[in-house]
Amino acid sequence: MRRYLMWSVGLLAYIVAVFHRSSLGVAGVSAAERLGVGTALLSILSVAQLAVYAGMQIPVGVLLDRFGSRRLLAAGGVLMLAGQLVFAFAGDIGTAIAARVLIGVGDAMTFISVLRIVALWFPPRRNPLMVQLTGMVGQLGALSSAVPLVLLLRHAGWTVTFVAAAGLGAVAVLMVVAVLRDPPKADGVPAPSLRRELGLRTSWAHPGTRLGLWTHFVTGFSGGVFALLWGYPFLTQGEGLAPDTAALLLSLLTVGGLVLGPVVGHFCGRLPYHRSNLVLSIVGASALAWTVVLLWPGRAPLWLLIGLVLVLTINGPGSMIGFDYARSYNPANRIGGATGIVNVGSFVASILLTVTVGVLLDLQTAPGAEHPSLGAFRWAFAVQYVLWGVGAVQVYRYRRTTRRHVAAEERVALAVA
């Protein structure tokens, strides 16, 4: 039972981290009004957070293998708490960006620390399911940042809302410090820096790690960017939904992921050699759903937007498959670095999409217009097809390379035996 207690505390820290990460998604319109910026500058808030998150993954992975999950979760929680406090009192875009950078650094330390808890506390056969449960239950943070934050912003104002968010972060930090412990087999003298560097190079050299990276890249960005920033403006300003209805749709995105996560985890545990087929199917379904919405004459009906959100719910569980590749092809002593490499993928894609959507919306919005038109949103979201194409080709490429690599390793093992 102790392993579940440790996992639960780590999971709580991750839920709060997702809450911090997603809080800008429903506050984007309020942020633009408070800071006096357009869509391009508004996108910088998300991009700064995502860029720091992605850039910190590999360094954090190395630190994780050295210092363990407890220390990194505590440090990350403190940084996110500080970021929300700065954001609560930010009155200009520079201060707001600095706040989101703090949140991005703290967030970068959180998820892979919890995955290390899973890898070291649970047996290998349970890992795919536990990773999916971690990713999906963690999205409760996004759920709690949807409707509740909209209501709090409306009735209590900006500063009170984000000070309250910082208070939630303080609770998570206290729980990590008081309860969480790294497993005994993770204790001991850290490996020399050269060995850590070589371990990271070995992880990168294995095509299975790169397959995990591109899996994470191609599956996670569409649903992630939709939830993180541009979904709410698209639904309210482009499709004309009421704010409460749009917030409920973002909540549905999270709830659907909670349902599908264990299904995907069970599939990966039972049929590990078909994981890439599932990945490519998820990409195809996402592209098809967006095609119907973007080509629909006029504003899409509510049932179609619900259908789009339901398809996007599997993006999160699909991106978790990348971490299962990292675990499959790397030993426990370098799991932190390998997980960090994989975790870069979706966030790089999300940065590219977030920036491009913001720039295209600005270019297509007439001076003095209250907000971008539906047509502007359609052209901006069409950028996704480029990312899907590149990612799908790379998944197919590294799937073949990984299979050849594994077959060669098995032949060598048989020859030695």
Image (cartoon, rainbow, N blue to C red):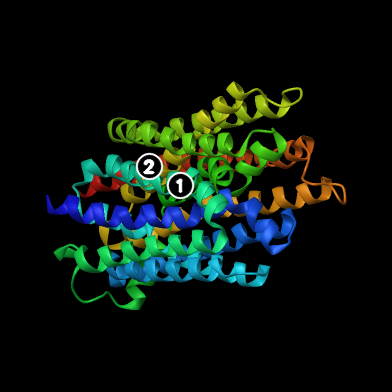
Residue 126 visible: yes
Q: At label 1, which amino acid type do we have?
A: Ala
Vertical arrangement, residue 212 with respect to residue 333, above or below: above
Left or right relative to 410: residue 254: right
Q: Nearer the viewer, residue 250 or 350?
A: 250
Above or below 126: residue 295? above
Q: Indicate the amino acid at tag 2.
A: Met
Query: For mark 2, does the 10 Å Cα neighbourhood hold few (<14), some (14 to 19), or many (20 or more) residues?
Result: many
Quarter assignment of residue 277: top left
Tell us which disc is closer to us: 2 or 1: 1
Q: Disc 1 marks which residue?
A: 142
- What residue lies at 65% left-to-right and 69% top-to-bottom? 91
Residue 77, x across and y down, in percent: 38, 66
Say which mark, if any, is on residue 136: 2
Residue 128 falls left or right of residue 391: left
Under tag 1, what secondary structure?
Answer: helix
